[in-house]
Amino acid sequence: MLDISNAKIVRVIFLAREYGPESAHLRDYISGLNADEQTSLVALMWVGRESFPPDEINRARAEAEAEASAPTEHYLSGIPGLAEYLEDGMDMLGIDVRDTEDRM
């Protein structure tokens, strides 16, 4: 499954929406995540944009780890629909973040 907390995913979504996917705020936050968290974030985004089906999240994580050639913060900040893809990925995986969103 994912090696990143719901709160951190919600924070990325918030930053992408508030400041835009190309913002320094978003890049700085993502660069502060550990490698497993960054890999999970990429895999979740891929599920959300339907590059992988939800039941292949572990394969998506393995692929994200194997294909990492640029810093994750640069890769993800170049994706205009990042916030929506992450939300869609969470929905597809059955992750409910309403409580987390309410606290933020």
Image (cartoon, rainbow, N blue to C red):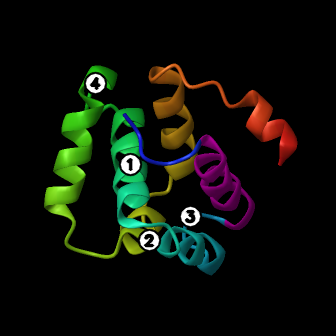
- Neighbor class of circle 4 (other Cα within 10 Å; few <14, some 14-19, many 20+) is some
User: Looking at this view, is 1 or 9 the one in front?
Assistant: 1
Label 2 amino acid? Glu
* Residue 100 circle label: none
Query: Residue at label 4?
Result: 53
**Residue 99 found in image quarter:** top right
First in sequence, mark 3 or 2: give its number: 3
First in sequence, mark 1 or 3: give its number: 3
Find residue 96 and report its horizontal and vertical position in percent.
64, 24
**Residue 101 found in image quarter:** top right
Find residue 27 and report its horizontal and vertical position in percent.
53, 74
Numbered disc in front, either 3 or 2:
2
What residue appears at the point 53 percent right and 24 percent down from the top-left corner? 91
First in sequence, mark 2 or 4: give its number: 4
Residue 94 vs residue 46: left or right?
right
Numbered disc in front, either 2 or 1:
1
Count of numbered marks: 4
Residue range highlighted in magenta: 6-19
> Is label 1 in a helix, a strand or a loop?
helix
Can you see residue 81?
Answer: no
Query: Residue at label 2?
Result: 73
Can you see residue 75?
Answer: yes
Label 4 amino acid? Pro
Label 1 amino acid? Ser
What residue appears at the point 40 percent right and 41 percent down from the top-left corner? 44
First in sequence, mark 3 or 4: give its number: 3
